[in-house]
């Protein structure tokens, strides 16, 4: 019985996408309603109208997040932004976000920001954003394609900016509680006050879950305090946040073990803990004809892992300080109005890694400094609907290793970008851009600290890329859609070798694909959204020429249908389908198996009762048993990390 349901679920996913497209074509022309409110894009480090923006940008609004009942920013990015994700193997709520098929190193090729401040650390652990209060998010900006000019290294796939501050202009409070299957208990509370020119926010959250496997319980605690001051054209923000996450580490399963019982674990005592503290100071003011902004961010992260089954422990301490100074002004030229952005970025980063096992140990400290200057000029000829921009960045980095890995590495890079957008009709635009991007090896790619000869260092060359994108978008009163083609030709791409242990520079590689997005208001009560992607990630030359890179699905589809039953009731159907992928490490494409394709469907119901918002949801409605991460070809080795099956959640929220 369960098998037949799964087959119908596979068929349902593409059927829903065809229905959305067909309905959009038939009904969008007859209903007059704006789908996406006009907003500003700030991922480019200055406020911008998305009209004639020479890049592909997706904006998830606060209204969409609230109506869908999303509980974390990552969840919204996946289901509302159409981004392919991969399981957080620590059991937390921070999956890997893969914008354009970078597989194992996806987290190191996208810049993730909160209020314009970068959250990625200098290692491969990715960014933690589950601490961001979901109710305070004003919008999430997903900008696909290189952002190297304004954000530096690791931005080849794009940028994700989570903009918060929603509701801070008004005093009030809110509280929410959610309970669900797999032992989920989620409580959140928020208090906002106003005093003259000051706005204050205090937020706290507690989350517990047993997750979908033995020894996979997770406890997460979050706290945030923020104060904003504004007067005239001046503004200051102070923010301090803390997060603590601890839980079990169940390890992988073999193919037979996954098929027999995906909930089991053979590492019943392994566990870990991560504590994070984050301080942000930022301000903006007008100085003559310039608008000037300064932000300083300091982050402390301590992560401990106790791997009892393998008889070793790990302890990582990270300290990161980033400072950015930017200014922009109107700068007209050649009969066009324009704006000029210039900026300075500086980062100081230290990580100490300690590994201890029976009879062996390793201690490596990585220190890194990075300084950059950048400029970006925009010109717009409004009468003819033409906008161009050009930018360049110079980055100088220095990295030094001490302890069991000794050595240093100097690296500099010049990145540039040119873009053009042209209005074709009153409601449609075409755009193109070309440029370059780069990435430095992260600390865990740079140093060798486990079963390595003494004083071993991976002096990897910087990864560089030449990037091209061409897009067309159209907006009507009831719908909008975008289609994009992109290609990134990379040299010295940094990744894991076939042994899944060695970090290396690959022979030349390529990322190439087509992306389609659409949102449509079918009628006053029915709306839909669709994201489709066809992508290729291949080796261009070398020993693996023509081979597909691991952990990169060639197709993905995300679709959404929203039915407004009444002013107080809403029903939403969300579905995502991801094609099969090569197993991690299978560079030669010789594995007999692959990571199978999967389709997952969620359904959510929201209802307003007096001052309460009540929500019920079923995740993985058809109880699809699947996984999106596997690291070994040999089916007898334990390298599969299963995703959860069907899960239920009921939540209630009240504003005071």
Image (spheres, grey):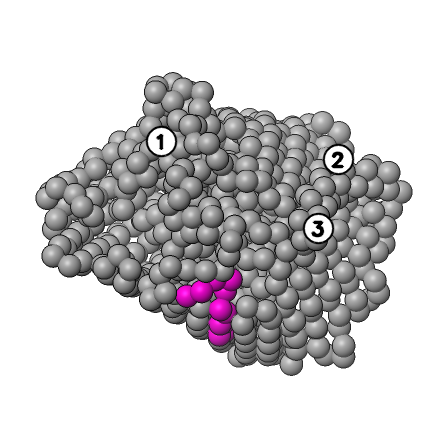
Q: CA distance from mark 2 to mark 1?
A: 39 Å
Identify the mark at residue 51; answer none if there is no mark. none
Which numbered disc, 3 or 1, marks the residue closer to the eye?
3
SS at badge 3 = helix
The quadrant in which residue 194 appears is bottom right
Q: CA distance from mark 2 to mark 3?
A: 43 Å
The quadrant in which residue 313 appears is bottom left
In depth, the one of 111 and 293 nearer the eye is 111
SS at badge 2 = loop
* Mark closest to the chain's N terminus, 2 or 1: 2
As drawn, is 279 to the left or to the right of 641?
Answer: left
Residue 482: percent from the left, percent from the top? 67, 35
Q: CA distance from mark 3 to mark 1?
A: 42 Å
Q: Residue at x 45, y 20 (%)?
A: 546
Q: Is residue 594 magenta?
A: no
Query: Which residue corresponds to mark 3?
Result: 5
Residue 536 visible in this rendered orientation of the protein: yes
Residue 310: percent from the left, percent from the top? 26, 57
Q: Residue furthest right?
A: 30
As drawn, is 362 to the left or to the right of 49?
Answer: left
Q: Quadrant of the C terminus?
A: bottom right
Which numbered disc, 2 or 3, marks the residue closer to the eye?
3
- The answer to whether mark 2 and mark 3 are in CB contact below 8 A is no
As drawn, is 79 to the left or to the right of 297?
Answer: right
Query: Which residue corresponds to mark 1?
Result: 493
Q: What is the crowding at mark 3: few (fewer than 14 residues within 10 Å), some, or many (at least 20)? A: few
SS at badge 1 = loop
Q: Which residues are magenta?
A: 205-215
Query: Which residue corresponds to mark 2?
Result: 427
- The answer to whether mark 3 and mark 1 are in CB contact below 8 A is no
Residue 131: percent from the left, percent from the top? 47, 65
């Amino acid at each position: 019985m369960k098998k037949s349901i799964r087959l119908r679920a596979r068929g349902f996913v593409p059927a829903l996408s065809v229905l959305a497209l067909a309905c959009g074509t038939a009904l969008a022309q007859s209903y007059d309603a704006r789908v996406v409110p006009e907003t500003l894009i700030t991922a480019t480090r200055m406020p911008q109208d998305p009209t004639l923006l020479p890049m592909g940008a997706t904006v998830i609004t606060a209204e969409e997040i609230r109506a869908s009942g999303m509980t974390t920013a990552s969840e919204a990015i996946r289901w509302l932004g159409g981004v392919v994700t991969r399981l957080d193997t620590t059991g937390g709520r921070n999956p890997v976000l893969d914008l354009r098929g970078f597989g194992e190193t996806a987290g190191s090729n996208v810049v993730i920001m909160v209020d314009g401040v970068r959250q990625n650390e200098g290692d491969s652990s990715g960014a933690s954003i589950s601490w961001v209060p979901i109710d305070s998010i004003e919008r999430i900006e997903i900008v696909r394609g290189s952002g190297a000019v304004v954000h530096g290294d690791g931005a080849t796939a794009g940028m994700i900016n989570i903009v918060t501050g929603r509701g801070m202009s008004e005093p009030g409070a809110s509280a929410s509680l959610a309970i669900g299957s797999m032992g989920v208990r989620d409580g959140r509370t928020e208090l906002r006050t106003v005093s003259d020119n000051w706005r204050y926010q205090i937020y706290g959250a507690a989350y517990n879950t047993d997750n979908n496997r033995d020894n996979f319980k997770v406890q997460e605690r979050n706290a945030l305090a923020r104060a904003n001051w504004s007067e005239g054209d001046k503004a200051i923000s102070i923010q301090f946040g803390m997060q603590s996450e601890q839980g079990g580490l169940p390890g992988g399963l073999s193919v037979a073990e996954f098929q027999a019982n995906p909930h089991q674990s053979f590492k019943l005592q392994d566990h870990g803990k991560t504590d994070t503290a984050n301080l942000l100071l930022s301000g903006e003011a007008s100085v003559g004809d310039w608008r000037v902004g300064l932000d300083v961010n300091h982050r402390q992260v301590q992560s401990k892992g106790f791997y009892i089954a393998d008889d070793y422990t790990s302890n990582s301490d990270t300290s990161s300080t980033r400072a950015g100074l930017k200014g922009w002004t109107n700068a007209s030229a050649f009969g066009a109005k324009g704006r000029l952005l210039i900026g300075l970025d500086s980062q100081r980063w230290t990580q100490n890694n300690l590994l201890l096992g029976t009879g062996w140990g390793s201690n490596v400290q990585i220190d890194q400094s990075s300084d950059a200057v950048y400029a970006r000029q925009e010109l717009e000829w409004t009468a003819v609907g033409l906008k161009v921009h050009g930018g360049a960045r110079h980055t100088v980095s220095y990295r030094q290793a001490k302890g069991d890995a000794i050595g240093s590495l100097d690296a500099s890079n010049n990145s540039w970008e040119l873009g053009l957008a042209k209005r074709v009709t009153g409601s449609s635009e075409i755009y193109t851009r070309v440029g370059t991007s780069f990435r430095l090896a992260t600390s865990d790619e740079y140093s060798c600290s486990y079963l390595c000869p003494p004083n071993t260092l991976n002096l990897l060359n910087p990864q560089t890329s030449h990037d091209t994108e061409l897009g067309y978008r159209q907006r009507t009163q009831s719908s909008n859609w975008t289609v994009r083609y992109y290609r990134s030709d990379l040299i010295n791409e940094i990744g894991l070798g076939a042994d899944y242990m060695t970090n290396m520079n690959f022979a030349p590689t390529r990322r190439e694909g087509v992306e389609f997005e659409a949102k449509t208001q079918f009628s006053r009560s029915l709306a839909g959204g669709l994201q489709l992607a066809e992508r290729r990630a291949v080796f261009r030359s070398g020993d693996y020429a023509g081979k597909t890179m691991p952990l990169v699905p060639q197709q993905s589809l995300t679709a959404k249908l929203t039915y407004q039953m009444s002013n107080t009731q809403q029903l939403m159907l969300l579905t995502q389908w991801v094609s099969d992928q090569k197993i991690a490490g299978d560079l030669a494409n010789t594995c007999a198996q692959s990571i199978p394709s999967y389709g997952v469907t969620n359904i959510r119901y929201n209802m307003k009762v007096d001052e309460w918002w009540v929500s019920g949801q079923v995740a993985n409605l058809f109880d699809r048993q699947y996984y999106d991460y596997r690291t070994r070809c040999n089916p007898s080795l334990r390298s599969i990390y299963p995703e959860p099956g069907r899960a239920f959640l009921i939540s209630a929220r009240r504003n005071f």
